[in-house]
Amino acid sequence: METIVGLLFIGLVSGASCFLTDTEGSRGHYAMYVWRTGFDPNVHGCDQTDFLDWNSKHSHCFTHTWNSPDKRQWLWNTCNLPGREISSIFLADVYHKVKAGFLSNDCDSSDITLLRTTLSEGHSRVTNLKIYALFAASDIEVSERHMVPYVVWYNDNCAHTDQEKFDGVAVNNEAYAAIKCSSDLNQRTTYLDRLQEIHDGAQKQRHGRLLTHFSVSWHWGQCNGHSQPFLWRGKTSDASHHMIDIFDGIDVQVGYTTFPQINERMDLAGLNYSRLLNKQSFVTFYTDKTEPCQITFFPQTCRWSGRSESHLFSVIDQFPQNGLSGIQPCIHYFRGVYSSGGHPDWPAHSNH
């Protein structure tokens, strides 16, 4: 994803408020990204020094986030943290598993069995949890549109119960950033056509509805600081508004951890339009190590204070007084560094 901290996730839910009430009482309705690996302090020799180095691509201190019973229980316990409960997760490392099953028409492989177990556990152990298959090819061809049929196949053929189904597909494609100011309008409309294929492909599921979610940056509807509306399929709007129309859910990367930048950029990205359509909204904060420091809560040397979980929660709790009533938070990402336990300021919520 782009090196920015905020995501405004907008999901299609009627009449939603910031914290909904369910049969087990009042729960939080946060969202959370779950990438393939995360920091693991349980690995021998992995200490706070390794944590602060944050070599997520090459260090043995990063292990799979959901491929074993103990890793999954760590995830479910994090989703059930009292007062900060998670109601939507975007789950990575799904693509190769469902593709292999689809191509061989095999619902009995170990990978498919792992998916069925993971989905069933998540839905049964976390109240009203929605689990999205996360794809991130991030190319101008929008290759994620070719991945959706694999999830449709899995849900229609391999899931024995609704508990074993994916609730949706989530797509993170950053390629629009390179063409947002292109004088060739066909580039932009073709990109939108390809996004539409994601939504249309999800509708081919025979049993139940597969939701769709897309990630955009706060400035994609603008060029040189000005709104850039254009005609696409009979409607003239900027790119952000077109994308809100296409998907059941949109997250907007706002690139800040402080107010008023958070809410100002959300407004530029079409927040009022999403509210008009009665769509639920999430602001997602980055916790992993990246630069510049104002885009993340990672505990690194920085002139900005508040690089801790407690400060993250404090910012979230300030949503109503900053005009964000009804807006939901989303955390990027599980064990990166949220709930990792690699630092005193970032405890592991593996037990509670």
Image: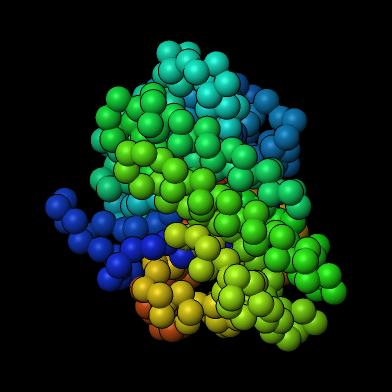
Task: Give coordinates of residue 285: x percent, y percent.
Answer: 55, 60
Task: Give coordinates of residue 331: x percent, y percent.
Answer: 50, 55
Among the 4 quarters of the image, the one containing residue 59: top right
Among the 4 quarters of the image, the one containing residue 36: top right
Horizontal placement of 85 versus 264: left or right? left
Task: Give coordinates of residue 172: x percent, y percent.
Answer: 62, 51
* Nearest to the observer: residue 97 or residue 191: 191
| Residue depicted at x 26% and y 45% | 127
Q: Is residue 346 visible?
A: no
Q: Vertical placement of 61 versus 298: above or below?
A: above
* Nearest to the observer: residue 248 or residue 126: 248
Task: Give coordinates of residue 158: x percent, y percent.
Answer: 39, 24
Horizontal placement of 43 versus 69: left or right? right
- Residue extending furthest right? 183
| Residue depicted at x 60% and y 70% | 233
| Residue depicted at x 30% and y 67% | 14
Color style of the picture? rainbow
Quadrant of the snapshot with the C terminus:
top left
* Nearest to the observer: residue 77 or residue 108: 108
Q: Vertical placement of 165 versus 52: above or below?
A: above
| Residue depicted at x 56% and y 50% | 198
Q: Vertical placement of 11 versus 227: above or below?
A: above
- Residue extending furthest left? 23
Q: Is residue 232 visible?
A: yes
* Nearest to the observer: residue 115 or residue 184: 184
